[in-house]
Amino acid sequence: MDVFVAGFCFLTVLCIVLYVYTKTALTHAASPDFKKFQRVYLTVYLLAMGGDWLQGPHVYALYQSYDISSHSIQLLFVIGFGASMVVGTVVGSFADKYGRRANCILYGILYACACVTKHFGNFWVLLIGRLLGGTATSILYSAFESWLIYEHNQRGYDPELLSHTFSIGVLGNSLVAILAGLVAQWFADQYGFVAPFDISLTVLIVMCFVIIFTWSENYGDLSSSFSESFRSALKSIQTDKKVLCLGLIQSLFEGAMYMFVLEWTPALTPKDADLSGKTKGEHRGAIPHGIIFAAFMVAIMIGSSIFKILLRNWSPESFMRGVLVLSAVSLLLPVLFPASQVIVFSGFLIFECCVGIFWPSLGTMRGKYVPEKTRATIMNFFRIPLNMIVVLMLIQSLSMKVIFTCCCVFLFLASMFQQVLYQLSHKNLPAEEMQNTYINNSDAIIKKPLLVHGSPAYEEEDKQIITNVPKEDDTNS
């Protein structure tokens, strides 16, 4: 048994144990109404992610089957990320003004149209498809989360349950990714490389109908124009250091993650890739991409379970400092030990566990600090430096060592910004806890749910607090 199969088997057992443990410990506090709400959201979210995962494995192969040159394929990918950075930022920001639900439906329509373009071997038609797909991706990573956070807070659910939903979303996304890879491969083998895109189109259409019949609409700031919303979002980033830190952490981490996605195959492929000479459990010859990808997804699922355990005793602002440092060290291993397949693969698995912790942690922190009125707009601004990093990487011809060194630098920088965020979040913690958790009402102390900064409920509560504060005697001033 080689290192990849052994790693996958071990991780699968560990994942099952952690899932059962965390599930038993955490689900008792959720009400039936919340569980129904959670199922409605996760159904749509996983359909949306499934439509994305179904396309990923065969994009490059489809382009090659149309006899498109490697340079043109690279250009198509650059255009896709560029569209996500520019057009996607604008279209994705429509969610705050015209509705998050409507924006999620638009995601399905745009991505479905991108799937249709895959039936044509013309470069310019495929380019349009990349523009549509890049724009849809920006919506996927902003509008769905914005809708969830608003609805969760509006319905008065426990704030800790929001973190639970994010964690389940990460776990479910990993399962969907594995299933989508198997389904896409089967249809590609049976009907050609374009078939997975037709299945994706079907899934996206189903997702749109589920949204139409199960989701209510919510907005950011309806009174502001689109340009005012943009200015307000920029002002929030400029004036609120916590929001700025979150954006930098996200961009740096995801930039490193995308570079990892581009480089893990050559990093794990032995230079002397022949079928003989297996030693010390290492794999020789063509590496089993399917098993490795499945192992990565299981590692992410383990990370989502670890997130739940960490959340019992620490805040995401606190434990993410160590997680980001660990992720940086894990991607330093292919720089220090490039010839050791076992060490490099182990480092990659640790990094994927960190990814599984990162996603629900980031969602939880964004739910706390990003203003509700311009949530989707700010989240799309966060993706601008991320896409710039990826585009620059795609147009450069950097060595694998340089790329992983850049990843380490980005992740160490992210850990530094996480430390700043931790300090900022604890600066006035006692006063904030009193304001958000308890309010003195006559002779009784009434427990209140945690209110999110920038939400209408938060602002109304703040006004009531200020109005009800007794004026001090002038002699005490």
Image (spheres, rainbow, N blue to C red):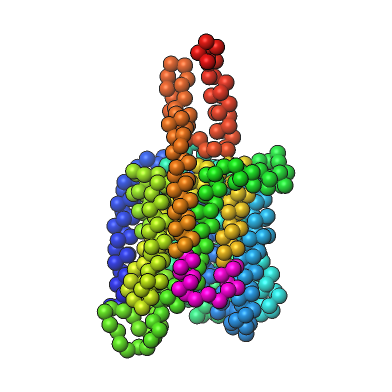
| Residue in front for this viewpoint, 344 or 456 | 344
Visible residue check, residue 445: yes
- Residue 64 placement (x, y as % from top left): 59, 82
The span shown in magenta is: 391-407
- Residue extending farthest left: 280
Which residue is located at x 59 percent, y 59 percent?
A: 385
Is residue 400 located in the magenta-colored stretch of the structure? yes
- Residue 12 placement (x, y as % from top left): 32, 64
- Residue 312 placement (x, y as % from top left): 34, 44
Which residue is located at x 57 percent, y 21 percent?
A: 467
Visible residue check, residue 217: no
Count numbered badges in the picture.
Answer: 0
Left or right: residue 464 versus residue 361 is right
| Residue in front for this viewpoint, 205 or 475 | 475
Which residue is located at x 47 percent, y 62 percent?
A: 409
- Residue 16 placement (x, y as % from top left): 31, 59
The answer to whether 64 is drawn above or below residue 310 in the figure is below
Left or right: residue 380 versus residue 252 is right
Of helix, strand and loop, which mostly describes the magenta segment? helix
Is residue 276 located in the magenta-colored stretch of the structure? no
Q: Which of the 4 quarters of the picture holds residue 172?
A: bottom left
Q: Which of the 4 quarters of the picture holds residue 288?
A: bottom left
The N terminus lies in which quarter of the figure?
bottom left
Left or right: residue 381 versus residue 166 is right
Which residue is located at x 55 percent, y 28 percent?
A: 462
